[in-house]
Image (cartoon, rainbow, N blue to C red):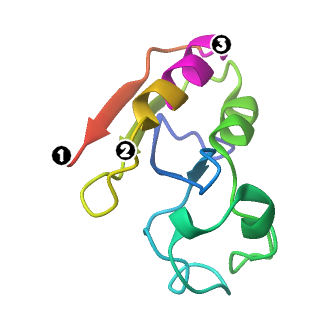
Amino acid sequence: MTHGAEGIETDLHLTKDGVPVIIHDETLHRTTNGTGQVADYTLAELRQFRLPNGECIPTLADFLQLVGTAPVQLNLEFKTDVERYPGIEETVLPLVKEAPLAKPVIFSFFN
C-alpha cells in the first residue's frame, strides 16, 4: 500500500483451532522456518515460526486491521483445493463484514 498498490491478493488457511491465517502454501517449509501442515498447528503454535523477514504468520484479523480503510481492492483466496478446511467461509465472512474496508472484497476459490 505504501507503494501505491491498487489491490492485494492473499491466501487463507485455517489453523488447527480455526483461526484464518495468511500464508501461500498448506505447508510451512517453503515460506517459514517450520515444517508440516498449517492445519496441524494452533495459532499459538504457529507463532513460533518465522517468515524470511523475521515476522510471524499473520492472521486475517491482523491483515484487515493493517489494511483498514485504505482504498485498496482485496482478493481473499480460500486455499481449499488440497486441505478442505470445513467452516472456513463461516469463520472468514464475519471478520470481513466487521472490518471498516473501503472497497468490497473479492473471494476466490479453487474448489
* Mark 2, secondary structure of its residue: strand
Q: Are marks 2 and 1 in contact (CB under 8 Å)?
A: yes
Q: Provide the residue designation for mark 2.
A: 78
- Give how far apart the Cα atoms at labels 2 and 3 are: 19 Å
Q: Residue at x 63, y 80 (%)?
A: 32
Tag 1, which secondary structure? Answer: loop
- Helix, strand or loop status at disc 3: helix
Q: Residue furthest left?
A: 111
Q: CA distance from mark 2 to mark 1?
A: 9 Å
Q: Front-most of 3 and 105?
A: 105
User: Which residue matches tag 1?
Assistant: 111
Task: Left or right? Give the position of 69 relative to 24.
Answer: right
Q: Is disc 2 surrounded by few (<14), some (14 to 19) or many (20+) residues within 10 Å?
A: many
Q: Position of residue 25 (x, y in %)?
A: 43, 69
- Is residue 78 rendered magenta in the image? no
- Check disc 3 and report the residue beneath it: 98
Quarter of the image where the N terminus is located: top right
In percent of the image, x 54 and y 86: which residue is there? 29
Q: CA distance from mark 3 to mark 1?
A: 25 Å
Q: Tags 3 and 1 in contact by the CB under 8 Å rule?
A: no
Closer to us: 61 or 3: 61
Q: Is residue 83 left or right of residue 56?
A: left
Query: Which mark is first along the chain, 3 or 2?
Result: 2
Place of residue 22 in the rendered image (x, y in percent of width and height, measured from the top left): 57, 53
Q: Say whether residue 76 is left or right of residue 64.
A: left
Residue in view at x 67 percent, y 40 percent: 63
Which stretch appears magenta? Answer: 92-101
Q: Residues within 10 Å of mark 1 (few under 14, many from 20)?
A: few
What residue type is disc 2 on? Answer: Phe
